[in-house]
Amino acid sequence: MKEIKIHKTLNNEPIIFEKELGIKFYKEIIYKFNKLEDLGGEVIFSFQELRDNFNLQNQEKFKEFMKFFHTEIDGRTQVFKTDKGDLIGGGVFSTMIYKDNRLGAMINPYHKQYIYSKLDIDNWHSVKGNQEKIKMLNIKEEEKIKLTGMMTTFLVNNINGKYNQKLVDLLMQFNGSGVFAMKWEQFKKILMIPETYRPSNIDQNILNPCVAELKKIGINITKIEKIKKSNRIESIKIIFNYKEIKEKSPANIKEVEYTKPTEQLSPLELAKGIVARTLIKNKNHKLLAELSLIMTNEQLEEFKTKNTLN
């Protein structure tokens, strides 16, 4: 999982993207700002980087993404209510499409207090998040206040679904205790669950599928409890534990492909080698890293049969 530092207030805003791609790109922009020392700067994506990182090789998909880039990039409600009760209008980001096939994003000045720079993150880790030590840092008072609200959210490539992407964020805030609890109405609002969904719909379409999906990244949900008051659901409690699963690296695939003579490769290794060679040639490192996740053994066998004879 890719760790992203974000303020707790912004982290608990409803994510309103219609598609999972919106959530991923929104987080990717914040992740890039986490790497800058000056939040007044700009982050840049080349068109090719977008195609490679977000599987947008299809021209129609890319056009659809470009339309989204200027209309839905903020992924939250139109007016942002701060933890102090102030209301901020406008988007988190201002965006630019350059003629030379690049996309740029800058932070709306009012939102800078909710996005973290490399310097913020370095300061946070220098005191290991200790509230008293944060107060003793030799930085401006508003920067100290900002650090006390820092939370970690995640961009996860090997699980599917916008609800699952947001559930990871909610659960991992409570990784220490393994107990997540929230008011039912707030939970539905943050996940942007359709108003038409009944509790049974939420179970069938969101909560039950999430158990298997989150297990892929080491989050093992052991109990989901909806706590009622009279006949009305008042809150939800999810009990879980987390054990990190290390992702396979592209190096592992290349090692299979090149360290054995072809005649010693198994059919499965040979198939992976063929796919890997294509991905390496096209410099598609993201799909290369996820090769074992995006193709089943049966798909690999079919690919091998069709391609080794051509």
Image (cartoon, helix red, strand yellow):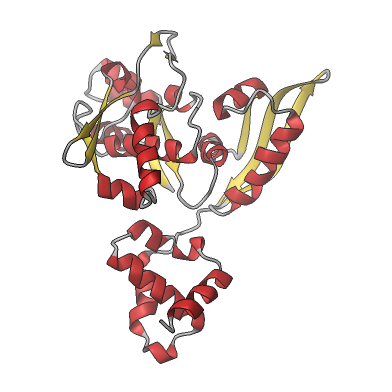
| Residue 176 drawn at (x, y percent) | 54, 40
- Measuring 57% from the left and 30% from the top, which residue is drawn there? 191
Q: Position of residue 30 (x, y in %)?
A: 33, 34
**Residue 197 in picture, x, y percent from top left:** 70, 28
Give the vertical position of 271 relative to 112 (above or below): below
Q: Is residue 188 visible?
A: yes
> Looking at the image, which is closer to me, 194 or 15?
194
Residue found at the very far bottom of the displayed protein: 263
Q: Is residue 87 left or right of residue 135?
A: right
For residue 221, say whether it is visible.
no
Residue 247, image quadrant: bottom left
Residue closest to the far front: 60
Asked if residue 216 lies left or right of residue 60, the reply is right
Front position in the image: 228 or 56: 56
Q: Position of residue 13 (x, y in %)?
A: 48, 23
Number of numbered discs visible in the structure rendering:
0
Identified at 34% across, 69% down, the residue is 278
Q: For this view, does 161 lie left or right of residue 196?
A: left
In this view, which residue lies farthest toward the right?
230
Kindly identify the residue that appears in the image at 27 percent across and 34 percent down. Answer: 33
Residue found at the very far top of the displayed protein? 86
Quarter of the image containing the C terminus? bottom left
> Looking at the rendering, which quadrant does residue 238 occupy?
top right
**Quarter of the view holding residue 132:** top left
Q: Residue at x 60, y 46 (%)?
A: 241
